[in-house]
Amino acid sequence: MLMRITLTIFALAVVGLGQTIKTVPTKPTSPTSGKEMFNEYCAVCHGKDGQGGGPAATALKKKPADLTQLTVHNSGKFPDTRVARYIEGEDQLDAHGTRDMPIWGSIFKSMAGGSATTRMRVANLTDYIKSLQAAK
């Protein structure tokens, strides 16, 4: 049975002069579909195209990373391990300051399926981000 997990997902509402952040329950996704996970969990900040312009981006202190440029910024090689470790919450990019992005590894571990399914989720999400890379 899938546990109901509550996660702060950034949903913007124009209220007077500001924006509000709303907490909503995560929706279950297929661990085999990196695209489905990206659209459900990542696109709100990174945008469906991965370029950092999701609807919640303006509510954050720092603009979300442009995930389409990871290969370009790493001498033409996609940093698979680094991306997976960042998703899992194992690594933090110190140069980027505080971490606004949720640690998906602990959230994925809380979902049904055990550690093998958690690894599958992280691998498939990493592969999907790899597929978003800009052409050289």
Image (tube, grey):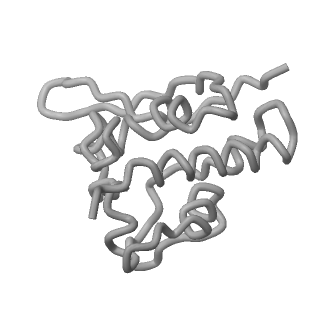
Image quadrant of residue 20?
A: top left
Q: Which residue, as the protein is rendered here, is positioned at the far front?
A: 136
Q: Is residue 2 left or right of residue 135?
A: right
Q: Position of residue 98 (x, y in %)?
A: 44, 66
Quarter of the image for the N terminus: give it.
Answer: top right
Q: Is residue 11 left or right of residue 2?
A: left
Front residue (pair 15, 136) = 136
Front residue (pair 83, 14) = 83
Quarter of the image for the C terminus: give it.
Answer: bottom left
Front residue (pair 55, 16) = 55
The residue positioned 77% from the left and 38% from the top of the image is 110
Q: Position of residue 131 (x, y in %)?
A: 45, 48
The residue positioned 40% from the left and 76% from the top of the image is 74
Q: Which residue, as the protein is rendered here, is positioned at the far left?
A: 17
The residue positioned 49% from the left and 29% from the top of the image is 40
Q: Is residue 18 left or right of residue 100?
A: left
Examine the rendered structure and indicate whether residue 19 appears above or below residue 66: above
Front residue (pair 19, 37) = 37
The residue positioned 20% from the left and 24% from the top of the image is 15
Examine the rendered structure and indicate whether residue 82 appears above or below residue 68: below
